[in-house]
Amino acid sequence: MRYLSTRGDQTPRRFCEILLEGLAPDGGLYLPERYPQVDAATLAQWRHLPYHALAFEILSLYIDDIPAEDLRALCAKTYTAEVFGDEDITPLRELEDGVYLEGLSNGPTLAFKDMAMQLLGNLFEYELGRRGEELNILGATSGDTGSAAEYAMRGKKGVRVFMTSPDGRMSPFQQAQMFSLQDANIHNIAIEGVFDDCQDIVKAVSNDLGFKRQYRIGTVNSINWARLLAQVVYYFKGWFLATDNAGGEVSFTVPSGNFGNVCAGHVARMMGLPIRQLVVATNENDVLDEFFRTGVYRVRGSADTHETSSPSMDISKASNFERFVFDLLGRDGSRTRSLFHDQLGSAGQFDLSSDPVFADAAARFGFVSGRSTHADRLATIRDTDKRFAVLIDTHTADGLKVAREHLQPGVPMVVLETALPIKFAATIVEALGREPERPAKFEGIEALPKRVTKLPADAERVKQYIAAHCH
Ligand SMILES: *Cc1c(COP(=O)(O)O)cnc(C)c1O
């Protein structure tokens, strides 16, 4: 399999060449040159595979520069019941008739980002070891991504993590999750500033190409193709768990921010997995809902990005969206470039409402959408607790609310559960008047010793810190 860029660069690259990369050199995102097709006979063969073996089958269609036995071992080492707390890895439970939750958040940091990040940690260690190289991952986090990256990379050979976060602005639970890690290769940097300051620092350091090369700076953000590919697997798993041997179509609802999770659903559907609808659920930050309703993609400024009670979906610009638009436009790289580089660059928006391809988003690609608010989240959390004795987090609540607006008779609806409620305890208390249950392994983590360095919002100071800790 070769990979190309959504902005027209056709230089063929193999999986391991793009594994450690972010954007393609022309500013686009990497996609496979084609989607391998999976037919009914193959699905029947895969139905009863354990998760790690299913992951190997799917990944091996996209990865031909890691020997099969090595890839198989990497999958087996990643997707264990020990790490993910369940033999199915992503277990399904039914709420009302035909509406299911697929649990993606039983990994080490209790959010779905573990599903991909845990594999990425093992892939990075493998590939860096093979090349005899090292990588220093520099990131900015306001919560889920940073902890998922740290738990994936802790103790890995050849990898160090330097994770900046806004000092005092994460929830006490999230701070404790990250800062209690004692691994020598994990560095928490609390920046005296807000999340945007952290992002600016990461950009400034990455733009210093000399420093970047000398200190082998990399990232693990959501545009990484390997992360997206790892997420394709649980759409297959969810489909198997929601259907019997006769198969049939299934719809998925995905609480969305950067469009990474639901883009993996798009890839699964393009491979031939019988998915009827891909329902994109947003919170008050409804850039994506607006596009699927109107055909207008209008990026917001940070002043127009609301801080909500489903904070991992508070985005103003969906970094993976370009991948879908490239497919929507019939893989026309120069048109994709003109929308995302020229039009977004100059006007901050583009408009496909009068273009015939816009109708294809729903008709050919199955995309529909909806939006949820703080009041909806509270109501959905209460209702789910009361009727089913199931406690869901705020992001999953956004999904469930929107899913119910798109139910179709006879088509199971699988809502992806993207985090556990304990991560967003304040809103659970607001909804139910009680604290969510805490998994035993996180009992008392706030009291553990913290490993964190406080620095001013100054890229030079962060560079000095990295340089001093790169050995
Ligand atoms: C990251 C995240 C999302 C959004 O996923 P995208 O891939 O960015 O669309 C939703 N819910 C939770 C809990 C998350 O951590």
Image (spheres, grey):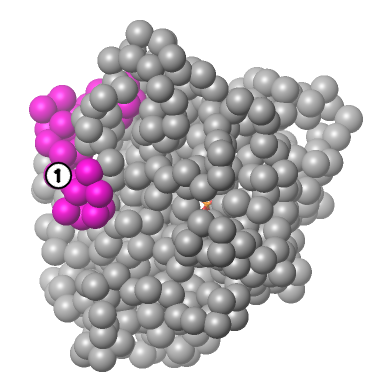
Rendered position, 443 above or below 146 = below
Mark 1: give few (<14), some (14-19) or many (20+) Cα within 10 Å. some
The residue segment tinted magenta is 58-87
- Residue 166 place in picture, x, y as percent: 47, 82
**In the image, 343: left or right of 65?**
right
Residue shown at the point (16%, 31%) measured from the top left: 72
Instruction: Please give left or right for residue 389 compared with residue 71 in the image.
Output: right
In which quadrant of the rendered image does the N terminus lie? top left
Side of 347 relative to 258 (left or right):
right
- Closer to the camera, 62 or 368? 368
Residue 69 among magenta residues: yes
Measuring from the top left, give residue 391's x and y in whole percent.
47, 64
Q: Is residue 443 among the parts visible in the rendering?
A: yes
Under tag 1, what secondary structure? helix
Query: Which amino acid does the dot numbered 1 rest on?
Result: Lys
Helix, strand or loop: magenta stretch: helix
Q: Which residue lies furthest to the right in this view?
A: 354
Picture layout, residue 367 above or below residue 132: above
Observer-nearest of 307 and 279: 279
Whole-percent x and y of residue 368? 70, 37
Q: Does the magenta stretch include residue 75?
A: yes
Which residue is label 1 attached to? 77
Where is residue 447, by image quadrant? bottom left
Question: Which residue is more in the foreground, 312 or 378?
Answer: 378
